[in-house]
């Protein structure tokens, strides 16, 4: 990943601009959302730790690796650059963000992709009857939190809406590839989370 970022920031690199949408223009730049933006790492780092078996953890790791591997060629051969407002004086979390995250390689959004993989994995862990009130409330809270994180990627101008869409779409494909089971007829049997092919 670091190699891709260094390559894309070369002076000879031709950058592509991802078109803005109405949603991007509506989301005004506000660096105060950086705390919400950074909180994605809490979800991505903590929730996979709820895995109960080695097979579950391997399944998540496989999806994570697939998404990374599929994104790197895009970063290398279709590098994008996003126009981010210049802040005269930056401090705190936003200053830290600027030190390691340049305005490059926004498409596909790994922030959105990894977040989807994490939520899909957590859903697999707890999508078993009965659905208790506690599970419903926690699940709703995670969805709201995730929606705020995605919104924060727009308000911090780390991504455009199309970046998020591409990241989630690629994550859906990688998630399916990581968890599919050979020999199971569609709709006749639910794939087990403990078996990864």
Image (cartoon, grey):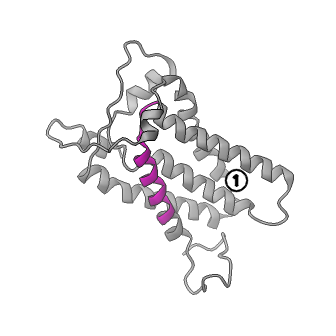
**Is residue 157 part of the magenta span, yes or no?**
yes
Horizontal arrangement in the rendering, residue 149 relative to residue 139 (left or right):
left
**Residue 26 x/y as whole percent:** 47, 33
SS at mark 1 in the image = helix
User: At x 66% / y 69%, what residue is drawn?
Assistant: 193
Q: Main secondary structure of the magenta part?
A: helix
Q: Compared to 70, does 109 lie above or below?
A: above
Provide the residue designation for mark 1. Answer: 50
Task: Give percent across and percent down for residue 106.
Answer: 37, 43
Q: Does 66 sit above or below residue 100?
A: below
Q: Position of residue 54 (x, y in %)?
A: 64, 64
47 or 86: which is nearer to us? 86
Where does the magenta region start and end? Answer: 156-173
Left or right placement of residue 139 versus residue 184 in this view: right
Query: What percent of the width, then of the height, locates residue 1?
Result: 36, 46
* x 27%, y 46%: residue: 79
């Amino acid at each position: 990943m670091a190699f891709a970022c260094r390559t894309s920031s070369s002076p000879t690199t031709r950058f592509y601009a991802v078109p803005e949408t109405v949603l991007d223009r509506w989301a005004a730049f506000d660096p105060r959302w950086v705390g919400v933006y950074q909180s994605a790492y809490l979800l991505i780092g903590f929730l996979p730790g709820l895995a109960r078996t080695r097979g579950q953890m391997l399944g998540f790791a496989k999806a994570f690796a697939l998404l990374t591997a599929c994104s790197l060629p895009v970063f290398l051969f279709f590098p994008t650059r996003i126009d981010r407002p210049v802040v005269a004086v930056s401090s705190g979390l936003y200053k830290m963000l600027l030190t390691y995250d340049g305005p490059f390689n926004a498409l596909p959004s790994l922030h959105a992709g990894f977040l989807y993989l994490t939520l899909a994995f957590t859903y697999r862990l707890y999508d078993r009857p009965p659905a208790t009130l506690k599970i419903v409330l926690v699940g709703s809270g995670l969805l709201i939190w995730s929606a705020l994180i995605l919104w924060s990627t727009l308000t911090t101008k780390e991504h455009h809406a199309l970046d998020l869409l591409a990241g989630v779409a690629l994550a859906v494909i990688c998630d399916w590839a990581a968890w599919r089971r050979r020999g199971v007829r569609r709709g006749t049997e639910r794939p087990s989370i403990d078996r990864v092919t």
